Image (cartoon, helix red, strand yellow):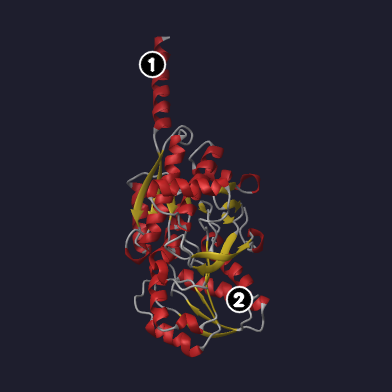
Amino acid sequence: MKGWFAPLLLALGLALAQSQQPIKIGALFILSGNFAGYGKSGSQGAQLAAEEINARGGVLGRPIQLIVVDDQGNPDVGVREARRLILQEKVDFLFGIDSSSVSLAVAPLTDEYKIPLVVTHAATPNLTEQCRPYVFRTSNNARMDSWAAAALAATLPVKRWANISPDYEFGRVSWQDFITRLKQLRPDVEVVSEQWPRFGSTDYASFITALMRARPEAVFSTLWAGDMVIFARQAKQFGFFNQVRYFMNPVGASLEVLGPLGKEAPEGLLVSARYWFLYPNTERNKAFVEAYRKRFGEYPSYNAEEAYAGLHMLARAIEKARSTQADAVKRAFEADGGLVYEAPEGRKWMRPEDHQVFEGLVWGYTKHTPDYPFAILERMRIVPATDTIYPTRCKR
């Protein structure tokens, strides 16, 4: 008996030690520069989720360990940091990513190292259209935002449209999807100007004057975070928002924009966010907002909620798979018609073919009230997920 008992004890000890090792998640966010507010809120949302998961005993009896790094919104830095997380930190998953360009640069590493990547923010539709087996997006993408914007734009009494969006992947694909969809719904619309400031610009004067010379009735924009804050302040000085009847921005309702602008934010902008902290009026959402405010002393932005929900979705997939192994987690995300999660914002459904989440989208007009130090949304319009589902080329 002595001969076999010692190896058995050793095996049991190793299994116990392994079961208690943390599940390491390497989270990449923008933590410096004009867009650092997004990285701050995203990492805080993930942190809150990890704390909740660990408080209930972790996943498969193992605690979640977040390792957060700054990818600077730079594809080269993102790839370097992702490799370091995989090879040196020995993470089990990659997570987060704010920039579309960074997400596209990091995505090939999932095939090279057979490691799942859960994207919670970067919005280019090209990411999930690549049909990579280990890439999952737990938030909506830019095409869904653009299609929702086009559906609303088609109801507006205007024909002359212009664009001002950042000159990189996210801005380009968003405008193309928006205007293509809008022309399908309203063949009478025309484009009078397209302006493409570089990502991270600080001077928008020439772009603003070019738009004003073109005299559009409505303007579409995907300027975000610090870019949108700077643009809005400069555009107000030119009287831009008084000349344009409608200004639409699918990420203009982010608290990373409305918070810094405060009472400077123009009223009447038609804006959206992938989550709005005052909607829906459910106990689930109220509890999340309260927990986030208690933990961090501020209201949760959409990036905070998306990262929070994304980590909970990943935890659920691991639990379903009963494993952190890449193929097992992939099958768990895809099983039973795609993983469904009831997030604070409402129902999220991941399409199994391309690993893209679909969800309802909230739009509204900016309005100042005495209840908040920043503009909130009034006259809200909810675009259901069913109105933003587009075909996929992916086969599973």
Looking at the image, the residue that sits furthest to the bottom is 213
- Count the marks: 2
Q: Which mark is residue 368?
A: none
From the top left corner, tell me how far across and down residue 296 is, in percent: 38, 49
Q: Residue at x 43, y 31 (%)?
A: 19
Q: Residue at x 37, y 58 (%)?
A: 79
- At label 2, the amino acid type is Thr
- The answer to whether residue 316 is above or below residue 139 is above
Instruction: Identify residue for label 2.
Output: 180
Instruction: Identify residue for label 1.
Output: 6
In the rendered structure, which disc, 1 or 2, sits on the residue that comes first in sequence? Answer: 1
Q: Residues within 10 Å of mark 1 (few under 14, many from 20)?
A: few
Rendered image quadrant of residue 180: bottom right
- The answer to whether residue 210 is above or below residue 254 is below
**Alpha-carbon distance for marks 1 and 2?**
69 Å
Nearest the eye: 68 or 276: 276
**Element under disc 2:** helix
- At label 1, the amino acid type is Ala
**Element under disc 1:** helix
Q: Is residue 292 visible?
A: yes
Closer mark to the observer between disc 1 and disc 2: 2
From the top left corner, tell me how far across and down residue 108 is, in percent: 45, 57
